[in-house]
Structure formats: C-alpha cells, structure tokens
Amino acid sequence: MTGAALTISMCDQSDAGSIVRDKATRSAANKIHWTASLVEERLEEAARVLKRLPPAKVGGYFSVWPKIIPEFSDLVGQEPRPMRRPCPSPAEISRMEKTLWWTVDLESDDAKIVLMRASGERWKSIGARFGMIVPTARNHWLYALCIIARQLNGKPFPSNLSRNQMLAIARFGDGKGKIT
C-alpha cells in the first residue's frame, strides 16, 4: 500500500465517500486529489471489507437443543475449521458503503467490471463474462475509474472528450504533468 493510500485509509473521510454535487460538501471531499489509482485502491479495500463481513443467516430459525461439546475422540481425524479474519470495524464498514456508492452513476457493465476487478477477479474471466477481449475490458475499467475520480474531484465530465481521449489522458497525463 502506498503512502497516499495509507493516508486515505487512516484519516476520517466522512464526506469523501459519496459523490456529491453541492459545493459545501464537495470542498471537504477535495482535500485529496483523487486519481484512478487511488480510486482503485479504495475499491479494493471495500472489496476486502466486504469479504470479511460475517455470512448472512436466516432469521427466525433456532434450535432448542443444547450445544454438543465434542470429545477428543470425536475430533480425531477431522479437518480443523478454517480461520477467519476478524470482522471489520464500523468505520471500515461505513467507508466500504460509501465507496460502493461511487459505482451508482456508472453504466451497469462498467460498474460490474469495476467491482469484479476490485474483488480480485482475473481479466480473462471478466472479459469472458461480458463478451470482450481483455484490453477492451481494461479500457472499460480504466474509463470507469476516471469518471469516479473526476466526480470525486468535483470536475464536470468533459463533453468534448471521447472515451479514447479520456483514456489517453488517464494513461499519459494531460500534457501539464497531471493525471486524471
């Protein structure tokens, strides 16, 4: 994890989690200059927190039988239960919820590609699921990250730029040393 990403996850970013359109809240979100790589790291963090949440249980079903305590002879030859990481903290969960809201404004395929990639899915399986070759899936992913970064920075979406021009700016910068 880079130093910039560590700064994001350590400090309280209560307003930076949601993409907002009013000026008062946007100024609090502009403390960080969001880039596609920072958005990617934040989405990956949200996917890790989502995996650490406890499994959902069906409510209303319970057993009145006492819990059976196995004896040592019952445990011989059994596989040990897999260890789970501890449940995430409430702050991590709220940051995850705000981060997942970033994908609401994206096209549905782009949002699914972003979330699948954040959860560690391989490019080949992402491309196969959406009927794309791997470079096309990567372009959709990078374009979606650029859209999220621009919205978090409070910049309007440029209507005069095509998708390919936006990707070129994201890859190589805008000529002024800045990367979207």
Image (spheres, rainbow, N blue to C red):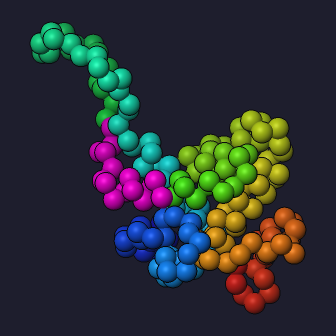
The residue sitting at 37% across, 71% down in the picture is 12
**Foreground of the two, 41 or 80:** 41
Is 167 in the magenta?
no
Relative vertical location of residue 154 with respect to residue 47 in this rendering, above or below: below
- From the viewer's perspective, is 113 left or right of 32? right
Residue 121 visible in the picture: yes
Q: Main secondary structure of the magenta part?
A: helix
Q: On the picture, is 174 further left or further right than 96?
A: right
Q: Quadrant of residue 154?
A: bottom right
Of residues 80 and 134, the one nearer the viewer is: 134
Horizontal and vertical percent for residue 96?
45, 55
Q: Quadrant of the C terminus?
A: bottom right
The percent coordinates of residue 160 (x first, y second) are: 87, 75
Q: Residue at x 58, y 59 (%)?
A: 102
79 to the left or right of 112: left
Q: Residue furthest bottom?
A: 176
Q: Position of residue 156 (x, y in %)?
A: 71, 75
Question: Residue 69: horizontal and vertical position, in percent?
Answer: 12, 15
Q: Is residue 21 above or below residue 139?
A: below
In the image, taking residue 6 as reference, residue 177 lies left or right, namely right
Q: Which residues are magenta?
A: 84-98
